[in-house]
Image (cartoon, rainbow, N blue to C red):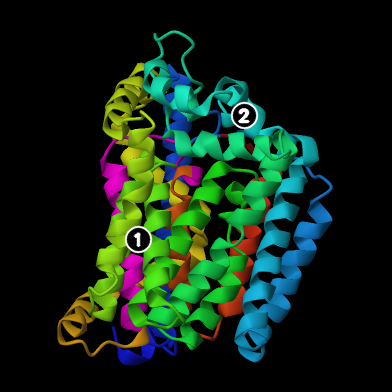
Amino acid sequence: MSTTERTGTAGSTGRNRDLAAAGIAALLVAAAVVVGTSIEHADGTLHLNWPPLYARWDPHIGPGTPAALAVAVAVIAYAPALTARLSWRPLLLTAWAASMAWIWSLTLIDGFHRGVTQRLTTKYEYLQVIDRFEDIPATLRDFTRHILIDSPDHWPAHTAGHPPGATLTFVLLDRVGLGGGAWAGAFCITVGSTAVVAVLITLRTLADEATARRAAPFLVLAPAAIWVGASADGYFAAVTAWTIALLALAATRAVRSPAAAALGSGLLFGFVCYLSYGLVLFALVAAAVPLITRTPRPLPLLLAGAAVTPLAFTLAGFSWWEAYHLLVERYYQGAGGIRPYGYFVWANLACTVLVIGLATVAALRRAAADAPGTISRLRTGRTTPADRLTTLVLTALLALLAADLSGMSKAETERIWLPFATFLLAATALLPTAGRRYWLTAQAVLALAINHLLFTGW
C-alpha cells in the first residue's frame, strides 16, 4: 500500500478496493443468512430464529426511532467538522454524550420495558440469581457446584457461563439500592458508552491526536451500539477499553503518575478475567502496547495489579480454572454441543461485520494491506501513527480470530465479541477524508435497519 493510501489520501484505486472489501463482507453476511436459515429449517441445530444473529424478524418502530434518526443525521452532518475544531477534553465529553445518545435511542426503539428493563431479567440473565448471593463468601465457595446443567439448582446460562465477577456487579448494584432491570440496563449503557472515550485516549496516546479525531465519529455511530444497549457485554467492553487506555498512558508516561496508571491497568485486567473467561485473550491486545511503545516499563506494576482480583477470589474460595473446565462441560451440555462448528466458524465473522459495519471492514482492508510494511517498521522503531494504529487493530483482530477458532463462541458473538469489536472500529481512522460521510451513513443505515427490522436478544 502506498504512503498516500495509508494516510487517508489515496485515489480511486484505494476506494475501489475498499468497496470491493465491503462488497465481499456483505456477501458473507448474505451467505450466513441463507445457509443458516436453511440449516435451522432442516434440523434446528443453530437454535437461532434469524441466523447468524440471536434475533427474530420483527419489523417495528418505537419511541427511540425519532431520536435515533436525529442522532444519526447530526453525527453525519456535524461530527467531522466538530472533531476537527473542538479542543481535546470537550471532544471527549462530546463523544461520550453522543455515544450515549446513540445507544439509548437505538435501545428505546424497542421501548423502555422491552429494550432496557427486560434485557437483564430474562431466565438466562444475571439478575435471576441476585437473591442467591445473600452470603457472598459462601456463594463464591459454592459457585462451581452449580455450573453443570445436571447439578442441583444450576445457574442460569449467563451466570454459569461467566466468572462470578459479572454477577457480583449486579449484586452490588442491588445492595446500594439500584436493583432491578432498569437500573442494571442504565448502568450498562452509561458505563458501556465510556468505551468510546477510552479508545480515543488510547489512539491519541499510541498513534496521535489526528488519528483519534478521525476515528471519533465512527466510534460514536457504530452498529455495535445496538448490543451495548442494556447488555452486560457492553459494560465488559468498557472495562477492557480502559485497561488498554491506562496501559498506553503508563507506557508513554503521558499521565501525571505512570505507576498508578500501570497498576490501575493491571487491576482492571485482573477484573476483566473475572467478568468473562474469553477476555483472557485481551492479553494479546495489551501486548501490542509495549510492542508499539518499545518499553516493558509498566509490566511489573501491571502484573502486580493483575494478580489482585485472582488472589481475592481464590482466597474467597472460587477456583477460576476449575470453573472454566466445568463451563466447557456445561457449554457442550447445551446448545454449544449441538451448534455446528463448521457453520459458526465463518458465520461468526458475518456477525462481526454487522457489529462493526462496512466502513470498518474497508478500513481493516487497509490495515491488513499495510501489515508487512508495519511489521518492518516496528522492527526498526521508525513507525508512523498509521503503523501504530494498524498494530493495535490487528492484534484485536487476532484475538477475535483466536476466540472464533476455539469453538467456544458459537453464536451470540454480536455481543460476546464487543470488547474486540470496539478496537476494530478504531481502524476507521485509516479511511480517506473524501467519502467519510458516505461511510458514516452506511454505518448508521445498517444499525437502524437491524434495530427496526429485528428484535435482538441475548
Q: Is residue 404 above or below residue 198?
A: above
Along the viewing direction, whichever of 165 and 77 lies nearer the viewer: 165
* Residue denoted by label 2: 127
Q: Residue at x 68, y 84 (%)?
A: 82
Q: Quadrant of the N terminus?
A: bottom left
* Residue denoted by label 1: 396
Judge depth for marks 1 and 2 and give the one in front. 2
Q: Secondary structure under badge 1?
A: helix
Around disc 1, counting alpha carbons within 10 Å, would you say few (fewer than 14), some (14 to 19), or many (20 or more)? many
Q: Check disc 2 and give the amino acid type.
A: Leu
Along the viewing direction, whichever of 362 and 256 lies nearer the viewer: 256
- C-alpha span from label 1 to label 2: 30 Å
Q: For the stretch drawn in magenta, what is the main secondary structure?
A: helix
> What's the magenta region?
386-415
Q: What mark, if any, has residue 73 been given in the picture?
A: none
Q: Is residue 53 above or below residue 19?
A: above
Q: Check disc 1 and give the amino acid type.
A: Ala
Q: Residue at x 43, y 35 (%)?
A: 411
Residue 150, percent across and down? 39, 8
Residue 116, percent across and down? 72, 40
Q: Residue at x 81, y 59 (%)?
A: 67
Along the viewing direction, whichever of 260 and 408 lies nearer the viewer: 260
Q: Earlier in the sequence, mark 1 or mark 2?
A: 2
Around disc 2, counting alpha carbons within 10 Å, would you say few (fewer than 14), some (14 to 19), or many (20 or more)? many
Task: Mark yes or no: residue 17 visible.
Answer: no
